[in-house]
Amino acid sequence: MKNRYLKGAHISERKVREMLKLFCDDLTATQIAGITGISRITVNAYLKMIRTHIASQFEDRLPMTDRSLIEATSLDQLLDSDAENATTETAYKKPFYGIRAIDDRVHSAKIIAANQQEIFEWLKSAGTRNPEAADNTNIRSMQAVIDFNNLKLYRIENGIPKVASLKGPVDDIELFWNMLKARLVKFRGLNGNTLDLHVKETAFRFNHRDKNIFELLVNVFHNRPLHAAKQLN
């Protein structure tokens, strides 16, 4: 079956476009499967390839002076429903993301595991001055840090973390965080194989919120079909 989007596909090109349109409408795999009549397993496989393309083609990496301190790879830890009960020994192993907003765009980067415990301790002392905490990282240059252990956003002010308040400023970082939280609720938690892709997808949706992302993705897939994502995976 000829399909410009995926070599050797067992579904028609029209069905792939339909699936892509529903993805752009931000429907879940279960919803897409119900509408298209395609199995949820197949839908999930396509959605992963789409998200991998987005991560590689539209990734807005965080500008850093030391690239060795951050990493934008998939996570190997699960985001589970017991995050709020995480202990000090294990909680720092969950992902932390540095966030900055530059020129109406949000940039994000996962902080590497080598610094996770130190960053966890630094964030835990939010609101207090601890000049030695997180000194060997560039995290102090962030505008915000997302703690996926407890689903909290910390604003960084003068190098000091502060838990974001509901009464705080509603800026691009806050809007992005609200969008990301809504997606976590929609997808009922995300495992380590998909969390990084969803963070990047949310950044893509936020940074292109004034554009037709369906047409944008169609143009990308015409030049670089979905089967290229299999190599990336």
Image: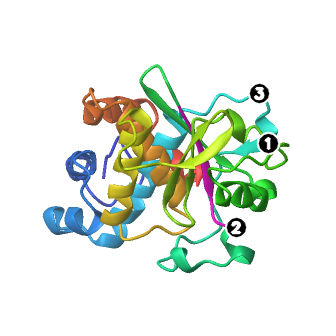
Residue type highlighted by circle 3: Thr
Tell me if residue 105 comes above or below residue 33 in the rendering. Answer: above
Report whether 112 appears left or right of 216: right
Query: Label 3 to label 2, Cα distance in Å?
Result: 24 Å
SS state under label 2: loop
Membership of 157 in magenta stretch: no
User: Mark 3 vs mark 2: which is more N-terminal?
Assistant: 3
Residue type highlighted by circle 1: Thr
- In this picture, which residue range is highlighted in magenta? 93-100
User: Mark 1 vs mark 3: which is more N-terminal?
Assistant: 3
Quadrant containing the C terminus in the rendered view: bottom right
Which numbered disc, 1 or 3, marks the residue closer to the eye? Answer: 1
Tell me if residue 48 comes above or below residue 79 in the rendering. Answer: above
Please state which of residues 83 and 232 is positioned toward the viewer in this rendering. Answer: 83
Q: Main secondary structure of the magenta part?
A: strand
Residue that badge 3 annotates: 65
Residue that badge 2 annotates: 93
Res. 9 visible in picture: no
Q: Residue 137 carries which label?
A: 1
Please state which of residues 103 and 22 is positioned toward the viewer in this rendering. Answer: 103
Query: Label 1 to label 3, Cα distance in Å?
Result: 10 Å
Q: Could you say where residue 188 lies in the image, as x and y percent from the top left?
A: 36, 71
Quick one: label 1, few (<14), some, or many (20+) residues within 10 Å?
some
Tell me if residue 79 comes above or below residue 142 in the rendering. Answer: below
